[in-house]
Amino acid sequence: MVVNCHDGLKLVNSKLPEFLKKTGYKNPTDKDVSAFKYAANTNLHYFEWIFQPGNETQAEAFHNHMKFKTTARKWYETVPVDEIFGTPSDASAVLLVDVGENTGHDILGFHRAHPNLPGQLILQDLPTTIQSLDAAKLEPIEAGAHDFFTP
């Protein structure tokens, strides 16, 4: 099934009442029981489904959403970052791990805003996302694959 972003949202919204009734109107807590999976009639999680052949338009829409959400004022521009993070005693210690942030827009922005803060910056996302990244564009951020649906 090929679903573009707008149609995908309509699809999930149209099936949401049915999904909620079927699941007893409980707050979803299981990634494998979701309104998306129910509406799209798939066993794949959204982040697996989106990168399947035929879903390129949906993947592009998701990437554009992630880029767009970074156009507003950032958290690290509104708080006293130096006070919050302090100065790590070990410059090789991890300063910040950004989990599930797609192509690293926020952590790259954080680094540009605070280039002199010592410590490692790490981006973690699903393997398919990390494999699609250009490591040179992420310098000095370290990218690593991690399934954030697991401990």
Image (cartoon, helix red, strand yellow):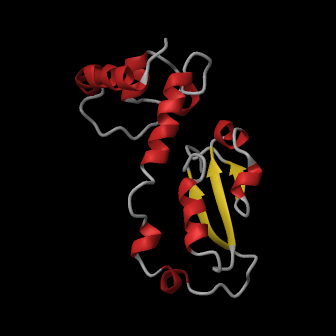
Q: Nearer the viewer, residue 24 or 140?
A: 140
108 up-or-down from 150: above or below: below
Left/right of residue 131 with respect to residue 25 in the rendered view: right
Q: Quadrant of residue 109?
A: bottom right
At horizontal 62% and vertical 18% (from top left) the residue drawn is: 53
Tell me if residue 117 can be seen.
yes
At horizontal 63% and vertical 42% (from top left) the residue drawn is: 126
Left/right of residue 81 with respect to residue 52 in the rendered view: left
At horizontal 51% and vertical 23% (from top left) the residue drawn is: 57
Left/right of residue 53 with respect to residue 144 in the rendered view: left
Q: Residue furthest top?
A: 1
Q: Nearer the viewer, residue 14 or 41?
A: 14
84 up-or-down from 52: above or below: below
Residue 82: x and y in percent read: 52, 84
48 up-or-down from 136: above or below: above
Residue 75: x and y in percent read: 42, 67
Q: Quadrant of residue 127?
A: top right
Residue 131: x and y in percent read: 72, 39
Q: Nearer the viewer, residue 12 or 68?
A: 68
At horizontal 73% and vertical 83% (from top left) the residue drawn is: 90
Tell me if residue 45 can be seen.
no
Residue 76: x and y in percent read: 47, 71
Q: Quadrant of residue 21?
A: top left
How many numbered circles does the render carry?
0
Q: Nearer the viewer, residue 26 or 84?
A: 84
